[in-house]
Amino acid sequence: MTPAPAASPPPAPTVGFDLDMTLIDSRPGIHACYRALAERTGVFIDADLAITRLGPPLVEELVNWFPAERVPAMADLYREMYPGIAITATPAMPGAHDAVAAVRAAGGRAIVVTAKYEPNAKLHLAHLGIEPDAVVGDLWAEAKAAALREHGATVYVGDHVGDVRGARAARALSVTVPTGPCDARELREAGADVVLDGLGAFPGWLSDYLAAVPDADDETARA
């Protein structure tokens, strides 16, 4: 009797991660940078308020404090000041290293797709010893889909309803954590496929998800 062929392993995933409030707790660094920008320009910025609505691009926050014609220059100044103020002040979110490691352990690729200015995003990751396979910055909400599709991401992990929109535009599974400005209810209502308590739950979820993915042999048998 010919033995049955061994089952194929599940496909190795490419998982995208958002950065701010998903992999890193950027509130302390951004708060300090807004205070420094206010001191430098003499313009009041409510840094306490600003860090409650992280996620969208920098310019969308700056329009609350500067005339529209000054925003591009203020964004450039903020980004110039940022590395010396925000990088060392910013810790990893609990579970961030293990989440990326779980993707690697499954034979997959981990990428970061973020609205943050890409050079500064890379500085954060290098400082914290998080080493994704690719980093793509300056993309927000649905615009993230282009990078997710380019890298073949089938899962995107984020903390904001904008991340849910990006995942859905890319036809990727939207996995979310309510560690940013959006709570679990908002994420579910936006269409998130999965809402975890935090990244600490991600490795277990990924293991269960991959175990449930039909392998190629099963798909062929059903064809």
Image (cartoon, helix red, strand yellow):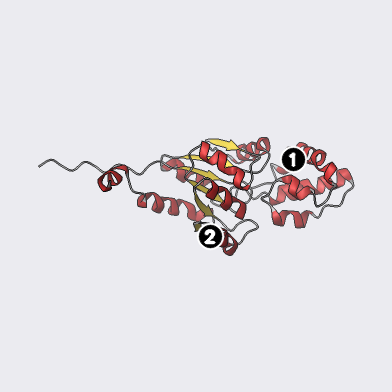
Looking at the rendered structure, the number of numbered marks drawn on it comes to 2
Q: Quadrant of residue 5?
A: top left
Residue 72 percent location from the top left of the image:
79, 39
What secondary structure is marked by label 2?
loop
Write the residue at 32% across / 45% down.
Answer: 215
Name which of mark 1 and mark 2 comes first in the sequence. 1
Any mark on residue 82, and which?
1
Of the numbered discs in the image, which one, if any, rests on residue 197? Answer: 2
When asked about the image quadrant of residue 52, the answer is: bottom right
Closer-to-camera residue (159/101): 159
Task: Examine the rendering and report whether any part of residue 160 can be seen.
Answer: no
**Badge 2 amino acid:** Asp
Q: Name above or below for residue 128 compared with residue 64.
A: above
In this view, which residue lies farthest toward the right?
42
The residues bearing labels 1 and 2 have C-alpha atoms spaced at a distance of 30 Å
Residues marked 1 and 2 touching at CB (< 8 Å): no
Judged from this view, the residue extending furthest toward the front is 223
Q: Position of residue 80 (x, y in %)?
A: 77, 36
